[in-house]
Amino acid sequence: MIFPHKIIFGKGAIDEFCYSETNFFAGKNIFVIISETIRKSGLGKKIIKVLREKANLSLEEFSKEPSTDDVDRLFKTYRIQGVDVIFGIGGGSVMDLAKILSICLSKNTHAASFLEGKITPLRTIGLCLIPTTAGSGSEVTTIAILTQNGTKKAIVDECLVPDIALLDPAFLINLPQNVRSFTMIDATSHAIESLWSKNSNIVTDFYSLGALNTILTNYKDYLAERKNSNHSLNTQFQVAAMHAGFAFNTAGVNLAHAFAYALTEQIPLPHGQSVAIALLPVLEYLDAGKINQIIAVKKYKEFIKQTIILVNNYAKIIYNVGSVNLDYYRMVTSVKNNKRLMSRLSIKISDDELLLITNKINEKITSFSVK
């Protein structure tokens, strides 16, 4: 299990970083990738101001899931300009973009080279990741996701774990409620899918169960508007998301994420929402039909049931995606072809079973979408 060289977290983490860590960046060429809303926030302005005083700073706003085109555009600009350190300040998509660009600049090659397996990833550029949601766990994982020709693909390597991960709960205070919900369910999915992965072990289970205990015990308070300034809960959920990231770093997500990726090939959705949409039908399928076939599903059935309740509580916002016409065959084919994820299941799932889950997804979207 690989960890960042330094993890700074808790209330005041940004102040600590600006006071004690930024001298390391003096005189360096720093490239910051940051979401627009965070750049405009007080914390975003503070980081940028301090880094600009210390270093030669370039900045790019980014607010969507990265594609190979996005990476290549930045690569063409900054391989000429030169970069010593990359900061990714935002949600999982911003951090993934920072991670991928760091290896492209280090190896002086386009993103597609890594997806095609032509070149082994290597990072010689410094990398600092600052998550502004509690969900993806990208600040501690060996994986980065990007889209190529409409299909989500992964780059996996230990060098994608950053040098510094910085988690400050103040970033979550003004997080929109739907983003707060979707990212929380993404972290929940990381933890629970890691439990039943055939690659799980006592260490990954420790992190998964810790994350699930925090989320399932406190999610109502965490999501309540009146609690948005509760630094204690925000810190707990940032740590829970990070722990879920530690778990799936080794054990790996599988069935729910395979359906989530297949879904986004047909409906343009944020990653967290696509995972939330897929998770409930997958949990219901496992709980009903496979509970005795997967040891972890049987052993941790109470966590399965509690997670089903959690997702059901927010189904109205999760499944409200408008009128859709899912191509069932395309969904099943995409899930089956995602061998990286599906290989982590300890059971075989037939085409008919995959069709059943797809139908459940479609039924829930139809039931909850506002006409």
Image: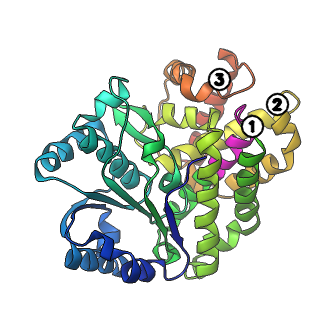
Residue under the image location 56 percent in, 21 percent down: 332
- Give residue 193's position: percent from left, percent from top: 68, 41
Q: Is residue 152 left or right of residue 367?
A: left
- Can residue 290 be seen at all in this image of the molecule? yes
- Camera-nearest residue between 189 and 263: 189
Of badges 2 and 3, nearer the viewer stands 2
**Residue contact at pointers 2 and 1, CB within 8 angstroms:** yes
Residue under the image location 68 percent in, 25 percent down: 356
- Camera-nearest residue between 299 and 164: 164
Report how far apart the C-alphas of labels 2 and 3 lie in the structure.
Answer: 17 Å
* Mark 3 burial class by Cα count in 10 Å: few <14, some 14-19, many 20+: many
- Give residue 202's position: percent from left, percent from top: 78, 45
Amino acid carrying label 1: it is: Trp
Q: Is residue 279 left or right of residue 19?
A: right
Q: Which residues are magenta?
A: 188-199
**Residue contact at pointers 2 and 3, CB within 8 angstroms:** no
**Residue contact at pointers 3 and 1, CB within 8 angstroms:** no
Q: Is residue 271 left or right of residue 30?
A: right
Q: Which residue is mark 3?
A: 354
